[in-house]
Image (cartoon, rainbow, N blue to C red):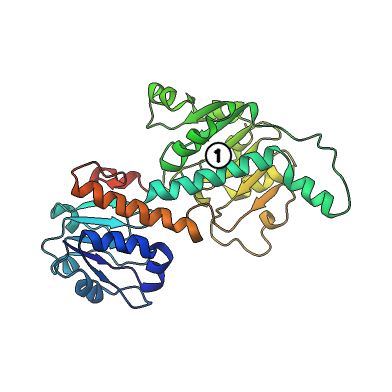
Amino acid sequence: MKIALLQRKDMRERVFGTEHLAQLREIGEVTLNEENVNPTEEQARALIANADVAITSWGCCALTERVLESAPNLKLVLHAAGTVKPIVTDALWQRGVRISNATEALGQGVAETALGFTIVSLKDMWRLSRETAAGGWGDGSRVREVYGLTVGVVGAGRAGSHYIKLLRQFDVRIALYDPFVSAERAREMGAQKLELEDLLRQSDVISIHLPSLPETNHMFNAERLALMKDDCVLINTARGSVIDEEALTAELSKGRLFACLDVTDPEPPQVDHPFRNLPNVILTPHIAGAVNNGMGRIAKSVVNDLQAYLEGRPLSGEVRADQMHLLA
């Protein structure tokens, strides 16, 4: 078996450790891109020549018919990143090539970040830390435990479903809005399915896990934000476009809500954006997914899906053509 890694060298080294490359070499002959630039179509043709498996990542070019001409035996593309839209073309589907991505691995990091935001925000640690740094000693009157509250989850994809799994370790009520998840499936996950407006009214914490699609653009608008409880914690580790930022700024300026935002629209926000200065906003620079040592999760998921493919088992990250319109 011939395995071609198309991503540029520095990206490969960020994602794949020596142990992951050793595992790939146990499976087949491995070709690496040794350039620190994203491959052009012609470079991709050379790298993928006669490969059975291609491994792509951020910055890789689309796998067009021109690229695929040099890999007539290609059977599987493993995308060591999230969305496959930058690399997928109709030519792949027409050739019957199977495609898998690493959204499950990325989703774990996102869910863990969302849980961290949940705990620290309810504990009021952000404000208390500022007060103690300034010489004070807060009374903790606004501290809440992750107990007896309603946590609303908007979107039950890889990240949202893992966040629900983590929340099940706490004594909280989990509410879910996802039009593609049945009430029965929500119960199996440990959540109660609600309509979005009901979830907004009832939740003490709301964590957004939605892709950026026309249907989700500014889903959290002024009308819906106004439905949220006073002191609700709003967490967005998904995409900035799902929130109307002007409307959220207006609500936050009232001091009514608390927001933890790992994403904005656009990124980064302007240096004078209110999100940078409002005391009830925690703004982080899109770190919720896999970063630094967490990149190893992506490599592990790629190797695991390759092994699953060889053994005839389902691929955890497989993407089908009929799912493409629902993906970020």
Q: Residue at x 25, y 43 (%)?
A: 322
Would residue 243 be seen by someone viewing this image from the given angle?
no
Quarter of the image that includes the N terminus: bottom left
Under mark 1, the amino acid is: Ser
User: What residue sits right under mark 1 in the picture?
Assistant: 207
Identify whether 196 is placed above or below 282: above
Find residue 251 and report its image quarter.
top right
Does residue 129 sit above or below 270 in this rendering? above
| One can see residue 49 in this view | yes
Q: Is residue 265 left or right of residue 270?
A: left
Provide residue 120's location: percent of width, then percent of height.
67, 42
At a point 20% along the width and 75% down the height, the residue shown is 46
Residue 83 coordinates in the image, percent (x, y)? 36, 53
Residue 42 image-quadrant placement: bottom left
User: How far across and down, in percent of the image, does residue 276 sit?
Assistant: 68, 57
Q: Position of residue 105 (x, y in %)?
A: 41, 49
Callout 1 crowding tier (Cα within 10 Å): few <14, some 14–19, many ≥20: many
Is 22 or 91 nearer to us in this picture?
22
**Secondary-structure class at tag 1:** strand
Report how many numbered discs are placed on residues in the image: 1
Question: Residue at point 25% right, 50% down?
Answer: 307
Horizontally, is 83 left or right of 294 in the view?
A: left
Above or below residue 202? Residue 283 is below
- Residue 265 is drawn in which quadrant? bottom right
